Amino acid sequence: MPEDFQKRVDAIEEAYEFMLAYAAQGAAGDSGAGSQIRDFLTRAAEALADLGSVLTTIIERERLEPAECYRAFAAVVDRDARDSMAAIQLVLAQPSISSQVVDNLNASIHVRALLTDLFLIDEILKVRLKPDTTYEHTPRS
């Protein structure tokens, strides 16, 4: 699995797991121990940036076939990543992040769609790619 992509997926999944635990706390805000929620959400937002492009780079460099199917799915990942990032950034813009807000973010169809996308493509790439394949992604201008 390409390292950059895997690190991004890991950061997104870790944030989601933390969000589940945070939502269960019933916290009124993110002061004190709850302040970690901002760190996890920030890392998730960073991992989401340009995620579709990273996947497209892998598809092109590995010449995965049928290419049109992979490119179409990369477009889905890109859209879901952008939608999820918008929701996460909205939450991060709040002066205080309650457990209820995070619970609603967890329930967001955008976040759930993205996670499902990542689970699917992660399993497919594990089978299709050599274990030692690494790529550096160059963002598109």
Image: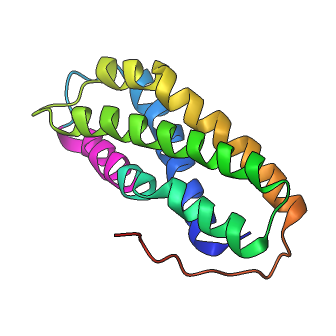
Estimate the x, y position of residue 78 in percent, counting from the top left.
51, 46
Judge by depth and name the residue closer to the eye, 92 or 75. Answer: 75
Q: Quadrant of residue 77?
A: top right
In the rendered image, the vertical position of residue 137 relative to residue 93, given as above or below = below
Q: Quadrant of the N terminus?
A: bottom right
Magenta stretch prevailing secondary structure: helix
- Is residue 32 inside the magenta stretch? yes
Estimate the x, y position of residue 110 in percent, counting from the top left.
48, 27
In the rendered image, the vertical position of residue 98 relative to residue 81, given as above or below = above
Estimate the x, y position of residue 118 in percent, counting from the top left.
65, 45
What residue lies at 30% left-to-right and 21% top-to-bottom? 101
Judge by depth and name the residue closer to the eye, 125 or 97. Answer: 125
Q: Is residue 40 left or right of residue 33?
A: right
Q: Residue furthest left?
A: 95
What residue lies at 58% left-to-right and 29% top-to-bottom? 113
In the rendered image, the vertical position of residue 85 relative to residue 91, given as above or below = below
- Is residue 101 inside the magenta stretch? no
Q: Quadrant of the C terminus?
A: bottom left
Q: Which residues are magenta?
A: 31-43
Estimate the x, y position of residue 99 in percent, counting from the top left.
32, 23
Tally the numbered discs: 0
